[in-house]
Image: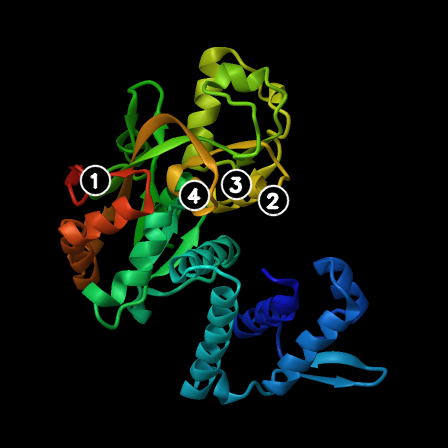
Amino acid sequence: MDRSYLYYQIAETIRQDIRNEVLRPGDRLPSVREMAARWNCTIGTIQRAYEELAHQGLVTSRPGQGTHVMAAIPATLETPLRRAALVHRAEAFLLEALTAGYTPLEAEQAVRIALDRWRTLNHTHVQLSEQRLRFVGSHDPAVTLIAARFADFAPGETPQLTFTGSLGGLIALAEGEADLAGCHLWDEESDSYNIPFVRRLLPGQRVALLTLAHRRLGFIVSTANPMVVSTLEELAYSGLRFINRQRGAGTRVWLDAHLHQLGIAPEQLPGYEQEKSTHSEVAQMIAEGQADVGLGVEAAALAFGLRFIPLTLERYDLVIPAEVWGASPVQALAHWLATDAAKAEMIALGGYEVRETGRVQWVE
């Protein structure tokens, strides 16, 4: 994000903490110096963020007493006026991006990528009574696309997305903290995806696997890097700085299993211990020169204009318990995935094969 808009990001982070009761009425915010060190920015940027929150009626500052969350949070936090203010800010960002030469598609992709980052951090639990589909699981650009298009095929529905990795998604299903999970877990013993893990983590449950797509997984490399690696063996001896996915991510499971098969110790990959929660974050690290290579999906590489070297084709399924399957938003989603329009949108993202998109397989 442009540093001139960093105060918006800081203010929004605090606002979400207030709304989600991480910060409660009367709580004192960190000093501007503490926050400046935390965000690696100037004191003036923090002061501007605090002023924005004060303008919204969320905090109050007094000389010598610091900045505190207001005792009574204004009802305007959820009014149409607040939504209108957000649209105004979005339009300002879009105008700035277009003026800088970016296309509307690039701006839309940038917003999705930024949202994906927040979805890995925000683990607010949503109760079933709120009638919102709770998605928990592996990050995928097509999932973000579906969320953006959801109102088109399921009017009035807005799913909540939380990216925790494939294993995290199945565990959330088992614990009743999700309605559907995104999963692409490769089982070394059976050389198959998802079903063995569903049976282990959801034993005795009847579960539908709704195929999102097959997606290409491979190395993401900077176009400026002259060194090309096409196998994990080459990577192990290349000396390139690697950026990894977090434990429990399907991509990490695939990587660790194949390293074990090849007899490659993780420490042979410089940077193996550095973890990111989404494919977009991996691509961003490479685009910014903080890493040389990572393992991710082609769509993420394309979004950042990076080189992609394919390694495998993996199946990504939406895992949906039988008691959720009949819900109208789920049925609308399943119907939409089977349409040519949905498949065309995924193909446009790049890196997806849609021959089985919308296919349903039941696991008993």
Asked if the residue at tag 4 contacts the one at tag 3, i.e. Cβ–Cβ closer than 8 Å, the answer is yes
Q: Which mark is residue 300?
A: 4
Circle 1 residues within 10 Å: few <14, some 14–19, many ≥20: many
The residue carrying pointer 2 sits among few (fewer than 14), some (14 to 19) or many (20 or more) residues within 10 Å by Cα, namely few
Quarter of the image for residue 106 reads bottom left
Image coordinates for residue 200, horizontal then vertical, percent = 32, 32
Q: Residue shown at 36%/65% (left/top)?
A: 127
The N terminus is located in which quarter? bottom right
- Disc with the residue nearer the chain's start (1 vs 2): 2
Tag 4: Cα neighbours inside 10 Å, few (<14), some, or many (≥20)? many
The correct choice, above or below, for 274 with respect to 146 in the image is: above
Relative to 286, say whether 159 is above or below. Answer: below
Q: CA distance from mark 1 to mark 2?
A: 31 Å
Q: Position of residue 183 (x, y in %)?
A: 34, 40
- Mark 2: which amino acid? Glu
Q: Which residue is mark 2?
A: 288
Q: Earlier in the sequence, mark 2 or mark 3?
A: 3
Mark 2 touches mark 3? (CB < 8 Å): no
Q: Which residue is mark 3?
A: 282
Q: On residue 354, which mark appears?
A: 1
- In this picture, residue 237 sits left or right of residue 178: right
Spatial CA distance of label 3 from label 4 is 8 Å
Q: Earlier in the sequence, mark 3 or mark 4?
A: 3
